[in-house]
Amino acid sequence: MNGQTSHQQPKDGRHDDDAALTEFLASLMDYTPTIPDELVEHYLAKSGFQCPDARLTRLVAVATQKFIADVATDALQQCKARPAVIKDKRDKQQKEKRLILTMEDLSKALREYGVNVKHQEYFADTPSAGLDPASRDE
Amino acid sequence: MSDGGEAEGRRDEHNDSNMRFGADEYSRAIARVAMAQICEGIGFEGFNESALDSLADIAIRYVCELGKTSRLYANLAGRMSCNIFDIVQGLEDMGTPQGFTGASEVHSDCVVSSGAIREIKEYLETADEVPFGQPVPHFPVISEQRMIPSFLQMGETPAFKCVPPWLPAFPDPHTYLQTPVWNERQSDARTDKIELARQHRKAERSLLSLQQRLICNGSSVATTSDEPYNEENGLEVNNNGNLIFENPLDAGKIVMSKISIPPKLSSQAHAEKKVSLLETFAPAIEAMKDGLESGSDGENTIPEKKAPVFLELKGGKKLFGEPLDLRIRNKAVGRAALWFGHNGENDDKKRRVEFILRQSLENQQELPQ
């Protein structure tokens, strides 16, 4: 349907599209992403992405930053949603716990994005650690 | 969790001091810092090491995946370089698990109205601009390649006609063949012997000076044996020492020198057994000094009228006990007279003289060899 409408007014639509695209790309260049361009260029070159246009590099950088920001926001929600572990002595003060990015929150947040990150909860130094005393003696 | 973080931190510190970082480490470190900055902007106050590493790894994978997908779409369209449409399609691909608005209108002509771009647009408008903390140089840095010089540059012509001269030159033959290590030089027997004689003289001079010093220090370095004995030994040594010098000139020429000693020396020797070495060898030392000052070759020092016996240096073991006298005697022979067997009183001395003469004959026979 969209194609049919664009057939009826092809030129105007294309002009609008082009204008919008140019505007969008210009706005991209105004914004400096947190991820440096050199890093993005390095990894794009590694994966075979060939483009001399710097705006596209910026686009990729911004897209990545957006993705990471979404993940981090979800992780923050998880962190805040967890009840406070430490009990404050004074009841008047609200629980103030430091917001620390942990693997738990991160893995929960990433699961929605289809990224499966599992982290070891603990590392045992001997194979018999944590077993019953009876079996350990054997 | 905190314990796990501490353990990792310690391990990382230990590794940092020993490890050499690869090319990947630099980019990963940059990614970590960038992630930390993003999360700080979101609201986090602290990170676990492992969590930050995982996040950085995920970001890198996202960039790589986006690049790969864009390249795939570009190649599918028959292009080598990617453009914005490829990237948008890649974004939509990566966003499919989560879903983005406007998914049903994916095949629209207008790219900007696609869901992925719209989301990015919103992000651009709402998010704070937090640029990367430090300037990042362009990497990886490509070091200059040292090119192998071509045939033309080396000034060589290739051995084969089929090889053009602008190609890199072949390696030198010593890299793949066994070639002699030393420099071949002409060996001149005469010059070799002269050189050897010079070195001998040098050694003798230094030894003489040492002995002179020893004399000066104490007269305890007195000779135990009698004068004639020394002189006989001196004769022997004289014979032995000068042989190598004079070999080229006087090969086969053995002259038994029956030199008459100056009466002064003989009387001195007979008068006192315990004679001060300095007095005794004063003329010898003077002669030696003269010899040193002249600095001439061994060939010239020996005057023709006094031609001592030239033998091989075989009796070195005997001489070792009394090097001083012998050396000085050696030098003195050229100028001073040598007294041997003058006394004639002791059979022992006579026997000694005969023994030395016999030895000189034997050495003479070995000369031509």
Image (spheres, coloured by chain):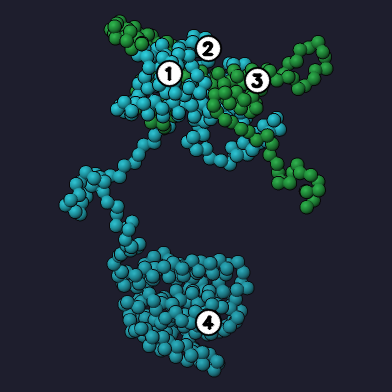
Residue at which label 2 appears: B127
Q: Quadrant of residue B187?
A: bottom left
Nearest to the observer: residue B118 or residue B257: B118
Count neighbours of disc 1 (C-alpha within 10 A) and say few if under 14, some if 14 to 19, many if 20 or more: many
Question: In the rendered structure, which amino acid carries the disc numbered 4?
Answer: Lys
**Colour that chain A carries in the picture:** green
Count neighbours of disc 4 (C-alpha within 10 A) and say few if under 14, some if 14 to 19, many if 20 or more: few
Residue A59 numbered tag: 1
**In whole angstroms, how far apart are the C-alphas of marks 1 and 3?**
29 Å
Q: Quadrant of residue B296?
A: bottom left
Nearest to the observer: residue B338 or residue B264: B338
Q: In the rendering, at what x and y percent does residue B41 appear?
A: 58, 16
Task: Residue A54: tell me if it is visible.
Answer: no
Residues marked 4 and 2 touching at CB (< 8 Å)? no
Residue at which label 4 appears: B318
Residue at which label 3 appears: A78
Nearest to the observer: residue B336 or residue A9: A9
Residue shown at the point (41%, 27%) measured from the top left: B69
Q: Chain of mark 2?
A: B
**Colour that chain B carries in the picture:** cyan
Q: Chain of mark 4?
A: B
Nearest to the observer: residue A14 or residue B127: A14
* Secondary structure at numbered mark 2: loop
Pick whichever of labels 4 and 2 is earlier in the sequence.
2
**In whole angstroms, how far apart are the C-alphas of marks 4 and 1?**
98 Å
